[in-house]
Structure formats: structure tokens, C-alpha cells
Image (cartoon, grey):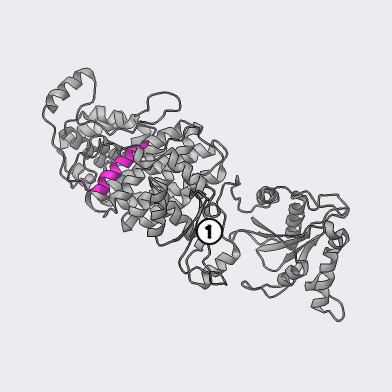
Amino acid sequence: MVPKIRRGSRTHGLLVYLYGPGKRDEHTDPHLVGSWDGFASDPGRDTSPDPDPKVALARLAAALDLRVKQAGTKAPAEHVWHCSVRTDPGDRTLTDVEWNTVARRLVQAVNLAPDGDPDGCRWVAVRHADDHIHILATMVRGDLRRPRMNYDFKKAQAECRRIEQEMGLRQLKPGDGTGAKTPTSAERFKAERTGRPETPRETLREAVRQAIAGAASEAEFFTRLREAGLRVKLRHAPSGDVLGYAVALPGDRNRDREPVWFAGSTLAPDLSYPKIQRRLADGTADAAPLPEADTGRSNWSPPARARRTATGIAERAALLLDSDDDEATAQLVGVGELLDAVAQTSPAATRAELGAAARSFERATRSHVRAERADTRAIRSAARGIIQAGSALGRGEDGGTTAMLVSTLVLVAVAAARWHSARGHAQQAEASRQAAEHLRAAYRQAAAAPMQALREQGRALPEAQRRTNETTIRAALPENSTRADTNTKIDALAATLAQAEQAGHDPKALLQEAIAMRELDTAEDVNDVLVWRLRRLAQLPAHPGEAARRPQAGTSRAKSAANRTGVRTGPPAATWPAAPDPHNRPPRR
């Protein structure tokens, strides 16, 4: 149940609209379902011998405006409070009596007409469709004072949540005032008239969000906006310093044929110019060089290397979110940028789902929690690296590293949902869960080819080696993680362990390290998660069709020494860039 509140100054004009044919949706049987005293005249059900709709409307408008006229100059200029309340398309149809209850509870919740107060404001509720009503109230009390209506929208939302639960309707998530402004009805109607799939406000919000992803400076941010085809207008101080910005879509004009400008703050709270300045200052992408641990393969394409680097940094973000510390809120902004970067450069097969994941997670990046040490350089550098590396083709190593990164981002989104739920952020937690679902769909698309190739390689292993690796896997994983899995699932993991051993690693030690990196309880498929962790730790190609890395000289000797000391052998594992640990402990790996 969604309430939308507006204020105006024309009681009669609004009544004419409510009882009229409608400008977009057809108004059917307009009639009152409630009023301040239960006896207001109803222009839609006038039973007089010679009813005149105009007279009936004027009579009702005069009754509603009575206290406004009596208050004279003390009445507010915008004295009309207008609230439309709409049920979800999947909800049952409410009766007139139920809508009357909804209207009375809302005018009481916002302090227009408290229960039992004879001086409450005058109001009516008009129904002209099955799924919604309009409440019109005049904001002058019977004692000619103005009602105290602080935070009326927030109070109406809270009351709607209670009504949904009591009436068995779809229960929406309560907000905290950090959500982006939704498009107005006028904006939606204009988009439909002009054939746009979404409103300019929504298009611009996504374009600005993508432009800031991994940007190293304000100049680069504004350049990206212009390269995206947007109109950009900067507001300068007398000194020449930038004070703010606004953007507009080419061709989007008002009735005066002027561009329709949107300031960043009107697109989303975190896209205002001061907050973008702060984000760039807290995490200048160029300030943290990209780690080189995963970039040793000269034949790997730049998109593949950038995704490998981002995977390790995303693991670090998940660890910080698991720490349940408020400082992790800075990582959420960085994860949002990383998702935007991946969506912009993803192969066509996964672009739609990754774009949907980025749009969903955008809500999870904003809350009232603030980090005192907002160091996001590492994760913003990863986003920047992906943007600069360009688009992945989705074949071979590019496709494998996309699956590797997306597999990790699923766990990051799940960790974000837990982090928000622990703080009562219902909308943000739900947005994180929706992003995780889109990421899972994208992962299934990206991982289909490389995982199938790995399973085939696992089935082709010599019988003795395959049994040895399966024994290693079952001994390392909890029984409930493998009991339900078939050999087909374990085949890919067995093939990865065989390739890691061929590259000079100790399979048992490497598998234990992969398991210990972070929990596996939230993984949809434990085997898939471990496959990608192992391939990144051992610097194996993400796509099994790529040539395997040969062991470095001296590997056998190092392996022998490691077996005596219990230290893992082989090429160094990918490292995470230094980041402040919220508990002053070394990062878990």
C-alpha cells in the first residue's frame, strides 16, 4: 500500500478532477467512501430530484473550505492536503467500508483529524477505481489553528505498513528516508507519450552512477557524463570553484522548449555534488595501485586480469561486511561502483542480469550509518581497472573470470543483506537480496561453459587420481556440504585440484586455505565457490581451455620443504590491498 502526498491551493479544482472522467486512467463510479463527519454530500451519488453535478461539487468544496474562509489571512497559502493511497496489483479488492477505515486511520496518523477531536480538519475520501482512493483535506482546524503535521509522509508510510499487516495485504518494507526520489506521475506519463522505456530521472540516475564508478577526479567524472551523451551544467562560485552540477537528457524539454535539468541531489541523495566530492576524496581510485598478484599471465586479456584483481578485493569487502562493523558501510558504496563497472563491460549474455543487480544494489548503498574511516581506494581502483580494461568478450578466459568475479559478488550481496538486516534496514536488506538473485542468474549464464569443461576434465582424470581428489574433498568439507552433491558436481573441483597439483601446489593445503577464506553457509553451490577460489589462489586459468601454468623452477624443492613445515607451496596467492581492519586484526584469508 503506497501513499503519495501533495499539497495545493485549489479545493474545487481537485474535486472536479476526482469526480471527472480522468486524464489517463478512466474514473469509474466516483463516490465518497468517507468524510470528516460521515454526512458530507456526495456529488457522485446525489439523489436529489434534479441533480446538477456542478452545484454538488461547489457545495462540497464550500463545506471543505469553511474553516479556511473563516481563518482568512491566517490560513496557509497551500491549504489542500492531497493523499492518494494505492494497493499492490496482487492485493485483493478492498470494500468501501475498508477504504473508509484506511482513510480515517491515515488522517488520524498525520494529525489532521485525531480520533475524538471535534476540531479536527475537514476531509473526504473519494474512490473512482478498485485499487486506490484519494483523500482531500483542508489544513485548518475547527479552532482555526493549523494542524501540527511534521513528518506527515513518514507517519503515513508507517500507518500503511500496519494496515497492510492487519488487512492481509502485501507488506512493503519500511524506509528510512535515504531512498532516491521516485518519478512523479507527470514524468511517467511524459515518458509513455514520448516512447521512453523509463523516465529521464531514472535514465539520468543510472548514467550518473555509472560515470562515478571508479572515477579518479571530478574532471574525469564530468567528462564521462558528457561522453555518455548527457547535457552537463556546472554552477560556479565567484572564485570559479564548482558548487554543483545538473544534467539533462538531449531532447528532453519542457513546454517552453528548454532542457529539463536535474541536479544530482534530486536524482539520489548520494549523487549530490558535495557527496561525490567526499567519495572522491575518501577513495581516489588512482591513489591505490592495482595489485599484481593475479596479473602474471601475459596471455590473459586486460578484462580478464582486471576481473581477477577485482575478485580478491570483493572477497575483502565480504570479510569487512561479515565483521558487522559500521565501518563496512563505506564498502557498500564501493561494491555498488564495482557492480556498475562490471555491468558496463560485461558480455551480452550476462549484461541484463548484471545491470539489474547494479540497479537493485544501488538502494543498498545508502543508509544513515556513516563510516569514520571511509577508505574505499582498493575497491574503487578495482572498478576503475575494469572500466579501463574495456568490455569482456565472454569467451575463454574473459568468460571464466567473469564467472569467478560474479560468484564472489553473490556472496558479497548476501553479506550486505545480513549487515543491513542486523541494523533494521529493511529496504536495503531486500535490495541486497534482489541483487544476489540477479547475480546468481548472471553467474549461471557465465559459468555454464567453463564449468562444463571442468566437469569433463574431471571425468577424464585417471581413476586413481580422481578417487584421491574426491577423498580429499570429502575429508575437507563438512558432511552436509557434499552428501547431497553428485559426482558430477565434485568432478569440477577434482579437476581443479589436479591442475593445482600439476602447477606445484599441495592440493590438501590449498583446499583448506580456500575453505578458510570465509564461511560457505551462504553459498548456493559450495563446489562452484571453491572451484573459483582455488583457481584464483593457484593462479590457474579461469577457463580450463587455457594452457595451464608450468611450475616455476625449484618448485619441487620448495614443495618438499613446505610439506615438512606445513606451508602451502606454489605461486603466491592473490593478495588483498591493505585496508584498515575494524578490529585491528590481520585480515582473514
Residue at left 25%, top 51%?
Answer: 449
Pick the quarter of the image with the C terminus: top left
- Asked if the magenta segment contains residue 306, the reply would be yes
Tell me where residue 499 sits by quadrant: top left
Q: Which residue is at the front of the view, 167 or 516?
A: 516
Residue at left 19%, top 36%?
Answer: 498
Is residue 397 placed above or below 373 in the rendered structure?
below
Going by the image, does 188 lie left or right of 394?
Answer: right
Question: Residue 199 at what x, y percent from top left?
Answer: 51, 63
Pick the quarter of the image with the N terminus: bottom right
- The answer to whether residue 582 is seen in the rendering is yes
Residue type indicated by callout 1: Phe
Question: Residue 152 at what x, y percent from top left?
Answer: 71, 50
Which residue is situated farthest in the bottom direction here? 50
Question: Residue 265 at what x, y percent from top left?
Answer: 54, 51
Going by the image, does 73 lie left or right of 516?
Answer: right
Tell me where residue 529 sits by quadrant: top left
- Asked if the magenta segment contains residue 457, the reply would be no
Residue at left 12%, top 26%?
Answer: 556
> Residue at label 1?
262
For label 1, the SS is strand
Q: Which residue is at the front of the view, 131 or 412?
A: 412
Residue at left 54%, top 48%?
Answer: 269
Going by the image, does 392 lie left or right of 324?
Answer: left
Tell me where residue 38 sits by quadrant: bottom right
Mark 1 surroundings: few (<14), some (14-19) or many (≥20) residues within 10 A: some
- The answer to whether residue 466 is seen in the rendering is no
From which residue to which does the magenta span run?
300-315
Q: Which residue is at the front of the view, 98 or 305?
A: 305
Is residue 146 placed above or below 29 in the rendered structure?
above
